[in-house]
Image (cartoon, rainbow, N blue to C red):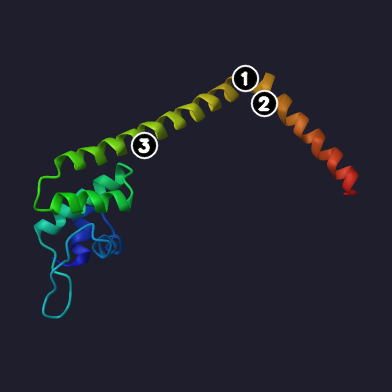
Amino acid sequence: MNIKEASEKTGVSSAAIRYYEKEGLIPPIDRTDTGNRDIDARIIRRIKFARQMRSAGMSIENLRRYIQLFDAQEDNTKEQIDLLQEQLTEMEERRDDIQVAIDHLHYKLDHYDDHMATTEEELRQIEKEHDSKAGK
């Protein structure tokens, strides 16, 4: 199949497929006699795998390393697991940071009248003082 069909089948844009190939995230794609990419089931599966790993937050560099380990002749299971564990730890830290932000926003909303309104009024007053000093 051509790259447009592969894009439709995988949900990955044609540009991203070309990028994945260029970055070594998928194997080099065979070409037809006219030079068009000829994408088979093996490449489709690799594209889907790369998309899933990127959706899991894995960096291009770590994904490339994981794929190199997978494609190597020797057993690299431990290193692959280590990379996945590293990614999981990073995503859990991101989740925790997001949860702190969510909790903070809940607090701001729950205490809008007694906290945010007062804070905003203070900020407005400071801006007025600044503007009057600056001659605005």
Q: CA distance from mark 2 to mark 1?
A: 7 Å
Tag nearer the camera, 2 or 3: 3
Residue 17 in the image: x percent, y percent?
25, 61
In the rendered image, the residue lying farthest to the front is: 74
**Residue for badge 2:** 116
Any mark on residue 111, and which? 1
Quadrant of the rendered structure where residue 81 is? Answer: top left
Q: Amino acid at mark 1?
A: His
Q: CA distance from mark 3 to mark 1?
A: 32 Å
- Judge from the rendering whether residue 133 lies leftward or rightward of residue 35; answer left or right: right
Labels 3 and 1: the sequence-earlier one: 3
Kindly indicate whether the residue at mark 1 contacts the one at mark 3 (C-beta within 8 angstroms): no
Q: Residue at x 17, y 70 (%)?
A: 37
Residue 120 in the image: x percent, y percent?
72, 31
**Residue for badge 3:** 90
- Judge from the rendering whether residue 112 lies leftward or rightward of residue 26; answer left or right: right
Q: Is residue 36 above or below residue 102?
A: below
Q: Amino acid at mark 2?
A: Met
- Secondary structure of residue under mark 2: helix
